[in-house]
Amino acid sequence: MSLLVLCLLITLLLVIRVPIAFAFIGPSLLYLLTNDQSLGLALRLVAQSTASFPLLAVPLFILLGCLANHAGIADRLFDFALALLGRVRGSLGYVSVGVSVGFSWMSGSAVADAAALGKLQIPAMLRSGYSKKFALGVTGAASLIAPVMPPSIPAVIYAGLAAVSTGALFAASVVPALLMALGLCIVVFFWVRRDPNIQRTEFSWPRVWETGKRVIAPLGAPVVILGGILGGFFTPTEAAAVGAAYMLILGFVYRTLRLRDMPKVLTEAVLTTGAIMLIVASANLLGYIFAREQVPQHISTWVLDFTDDATVFLLLVLLLSLVLGTALDAIAVLTLTVPILLPISAAYGVDPIALGVLMILSQMIGLLTPPVGTVTFVLQAIAKARMAEVFWGSLPFMIPLLALCFAIIFWPDAILYLPKELGL
């Protein structure tokens, strides 16, 4: 079986909407069997790809996000933000972005963010006179902050693949995530100016005080997690475990979590973890085949012959990430492309941390683009909307995200400043 046939089979399976992991595994096993390779080799490759200490942080961060979701943390953040910004024109748009920033410190997943916050924000916006496109667009775009802002699950995956410090990658991601929020707020400002039907709420200091007290303890979670990692007190895996324990205690103290809820929370965490790890394992198996066929060497030779400019190389990486992100899950793209692109980036002198931030951010945009954008499907289900409504509503918000990608390419030192200052 040739490499071309393998790629055609995978493409066909993806087109007919076979789940990514199975679209990779089936043709890969067929390739190995028809090229005198044993299934034992495939099992070893699959086992080795997930037997990694850095990847142990993934299920723990997922558990943290599930606990935060079921503990009602999103509701508390939403109430506080609305009390603070209710009088501002277009307040719910800014609230959507602000709450996503707050919740991203705990979730690390765009899908979890969109699911938890979309149920609150979209109906509230529609009741207050916002258009459906705006409600879908700002909620979907704001949810992309979660996989960029630490603790980020894609960052943990990238750090494991690239053998770089997870703490350094977390630190480098903070500024881009905040700039994402700023860019989305700018779009909100211009959008709501031309909508006369938007309602506002009265500002009340007692309400701000009352809702503010309810978010003090939840906002301690990012202090514990990021403070522990960046301060050198915890590894990311240990910080994830401490954060999950902290959120579990909060849920029981607030009585929003009960023992009878734990099977549901744990089942959700296990299913999400299993889906991610299956994608990692299947992409690693496909990556072995690419390595056997010397695909990385061929790509490296072509790129180095095409240009000797690091900026042009990063523009090619951006284009590749955007294209692959429309068809594949971000975890699959990272697992497939990082082993290929990392050695090439070293030849150009590109910092692997800057490369990681660029790849993660650019692939997150794919979560809002057809045909595979998972955030799009979540918002469709919540708002009973068409995919076209979600996409066109999200499109204006993609402009600042793409602008940020270009900023990272042309000024990578700006995002590397914080990890260098922290000595990471």
Image (tube, grey):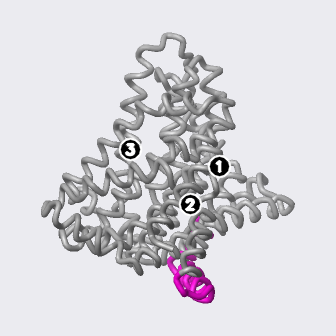
Mark carried by residue 73: 1
Determine the residue located farthest toward the left in the rendered image.
Answer: 308
Reading the chain from its start, which is encountered first: label 2 or label 3? 3
Is 423 positioned to the left or the right of 241 in the image? left
**Residue under pointer 2:** 221
Tag 1: residue type? Ile
Asked if one can make out residue 198 in the rendered structure from this viewpoint, the answer is yes
Residue 168 in which image quadrant: bottom left
Is 417 positioned to the left or the right of 83 in the image? left
Q: Nearer the viewer, mark 2 or mark 3?
A: 3
**Residue under pointer 3:** 180
Tag 3: residue type? Met
Q: Residues within 10 Å of mark 3 (few under 14, many from 20)?
A: many
Q: Nearer the viewer, residue 129 or 422?
A: 129
Q: Residue 52 lies in magenta, yes or no?
A: yes
| Quarter containing the C terminus | bottom left
Q: Nearer the viewer, residue 150 or 136?
A: 136
Tag 2: residue type? Ala
Q: CA distance from mark 1 to mark 3?
A: 22 Å
Q: Which residues are magenta?
A: 35-61
Mark carried by residue 424: none
Reading the chain from its start, which is encountered first: label 1 or label 3? 1
